[in-house]
Image: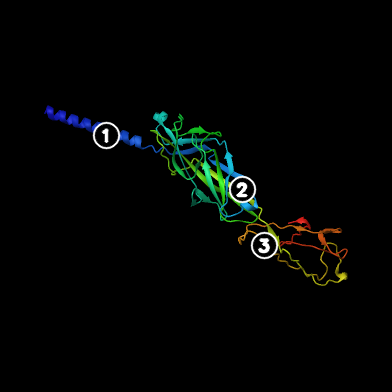
Amino acid sequence: MQIIFGEKCVSLLRLFFAAVLMLWCAQTAAYSGQCHTTQGNPYIGVNFGVKTLEEEANTAGVVKDKFYQWNESNDYYVSCDCDKDNVRSGRWAFAADSPLVYLGDNWYKINDYLAAKVLLQVKGRSPTAVPFENVGTGGDTRWHICDPGGQRLGGQGASGNSGSFSLKILQPFVGSVVIPPMALARLYECYNIPAGDSCTTTGTPVLVYYLSGTINSLGSCSVNAGETIEVDLGDVFAANFRVVGHKPLGARTAELAIPVRCNTGNAGLVNVNLSLTATTDPSYPQAIKTSRPGVGVVVTDSQNNIISPAGGT
């Protein structure tokens, strides 16, 4: 009986230690290391303002390296799914992707005309082209990174606060291309305990980068080059001119279609600005002077707004 009792005790003791071991393993395996922003500004605006492309650069396949660089100082708090009792043995790792259409070789499609290649700076590493995963940066103990409230990260030296993007011309364009604010890239952060470089683009990004700006092209265009534009206004009796600044009685309005040819050969024009320059009538500056004193011609747009002959658009 004592032997049987002893065997039962030994068996129960083994089961107990096995259960404790299983619980401990389950607890250590439960931490994913994934981080998320708890407060602060998780967005970085990549607004490059207004830039102009020279005519020779407005060619399909041309790449403008480091078209724009940024070095922000966002302050934000990050909390990671990790073991706070062993925080000193952890290691940072990063991943990044983009919601834009991937074209290959790290290029993402902005629109039909432009593509971007994004490089992000993470601590202790050279700028890395998006997309990337499992980029470790070595040990850097942050005592509160595993706390629900998170650890404050910020300043220009913080991972992800600096970077650049290169621009690629997919097809030439004329005029201006306006890029409204759009998500360009997303940075994911992990704190792995025990130390490791594992980090994927799952969960919630710590930082999101928004691209915006305007690019002007210096592509040349001509208006009816080498030809004279004739507009027939018909015959008007002198007696029908009665009020300064108004059309004479019975006068008709002539609609004018002006052909514009541009050197890119691209039928899908984005935006072309035209201006009018002519001799103004001294008695009515909004009109173009004619050979007949006191008689001028007024040009309007499709909304009947008068276009000034002194460079009006």
In primary-sequence order, the first of circles 3 and 2 is 2
Identify the image's colour scheme: rainbow, by chain, secondary structure or one colour.
rainbow
- Quarter of image, res 190: top left
Name the kind of residue labelled 2 in the image. Gly
Residue 84 appearing in the image: no
Q: Residue at x 19, y 29 (%)?
A: 10
Number of marks drawn: 3
According to the image, label 2 marks what residue? 213
Occupied quadrant, residue 258: bottom right
Residue 183, position as x, y percentages in the image: 53, 47
Say which quadrant the C terminus sits in. Answer: bottom right
Helix, strand or loop status at disc 1: helix
Quadrant location of the N terminus? top left
Q: Is residue 222 visible?
A: yes
| Residue drawn at the location 81% of the way across and 61% of the way down | 288
Q: Amino acid at mark 3?
A: Arg
What residue is shown with label 1? 19
Describe residue 289's horizontal placement relative to residue 194 as left or right: right
Instruction: Say what secondary structure mark 2 lies in.
Output: strand
206 to 218, vertically: above or below:
above
Work out whether mark 2 precedes mark 1 in sequence or the reverse, and give the earlier one. 1
Q: Amino acid at mark 1?
A: Ala
- Give how far across and how far down residue 237 sits, in percent: 86, 72
Measured Cα–Cα span from mark 2 to mark 1? 60 Å
Front residue of this view, candidates 129 and 80: 129
Which of the marked residues, 3 or 1, is nearer the chain's N terminus? 1
Q: Residues within 10 Å of mark 1 (few under 14, many from 20)?
A: few
Would you name the residue on which mark 3 appears?
Answer: 261
Nearer to me, 60 or 109: 60
Disc 3 residue crowd, few under 14, some 14–19, many 20+, Cα 10 Å: some
Q: Residue at x 53, y 47 (%)?
A: 117
Q: Is residue 85 above or below residue 183?
A: above
